[in-house]
Amino acid sequence: MNTSRQIVKFTWTQGLLLGATGMLAILIVQAFGKAFPFIPVIGCGVALLVFNVFAFLLYFRVLQSMPKTVTMYLMLIKVIRMLLCVMFIAAYGMLGGPSLLTVAATVLAFYLVALVHESIFYVRMEKKLKESV
């Protein structure tokens, strides 16, 4: 399996999905005539993308060194991602950022899109690995 190709494909598809989700959130918020907080949402989206790509790179290391622990690793990554999103929303709320509901809804949408995309991607990779063996 070509790992560099898989990494590039994962990064591009994850980035496009997060970008599309962000654009959809902007359109929905502006349709209601509210101001959209661009800086925190873009920061969270970029941080989530970087975290997911790092987790994907680490996935290959775990797959090579300890293949029996891959399932536990994937569950751990999902829990860490959830905690990071919750901590981001809590920190934004504590700092008194405007439009907390908008930011929280957008971060939740980012989280769900990343979760679904990553799950589908890992399942497809596992199928390819099992077919190649």
Image (cartoon, rainbow, N blue to C red):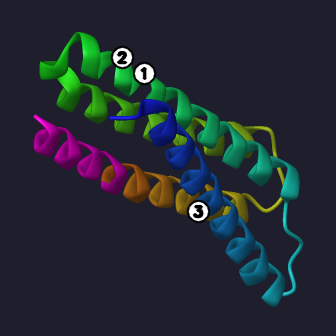
Residue drawn at point x = 30 percent, y = 18 percent: 62
- Are dots 2 and 3 in contact, CB under 8 Å? no
- Are dots 1 and 2 in contact, CB under 8 Å? yes
Residue underneath mark 3: 17
Is disc 2 placed on a helix, strand or loop?
helix
Real-space Cα distance between discs 2 and 3?
Answer: 25 Å
Q: Amino acid at mark 2?
A: Arg
Q: Nearer the viewer, residue 87 or 70?
A: 70
Does 5 sit above or below residue 68? below
Q: Residues within 10 Å of mark 3 (few under 14, many from 20)?
A: some
Is disc 3 placed on a helix, strand or loop?
helix
Q: Amino acid at mark 3?
A: Leu
Measured as percent of width and height from the top left, residue 52 is found at: 52, 37
Q: Upstream in the sequence, badge 1 or badge 3?
A: 3
Real-space Cα distance between discs 1 and 2?
Answer: 5 Å
Does 6 sit above or below residue 20? above
Left/right placement of residue 26 relative to residue 121 reads right
Residue underneath mark 2: 61
Q: Quadrant of the N terminus?
A: top left
Q: Which residues are magenta?
A: 120-133
Q: Nearer the viewer, mark 2 or mark 3?
A: 2
Q: Is residue 8 magenta?
A: no
Measured as percent of width and height from the top left, residue 80 is found at: 43, 31
Residue underneath mark 1: 58
For residue 18, what is the image quadrant?
bottom right
Q: Is residue 121 magenta?
A: yes
Q: Residues within 10 Å of mark 2 (few under 14, many from 20)?
A: few
Left/right placement of residue 79 relative to residue 14 reads left
Q: Main secondary structure of the magenta part?
A: helix
Q: Amino acid at mark 1?
A: Leu
Measured as percent of width and height from the top left, residue 21 is found at: 63, 68
Residue drawn at point x = 79 percent, y = 62 percent: 99
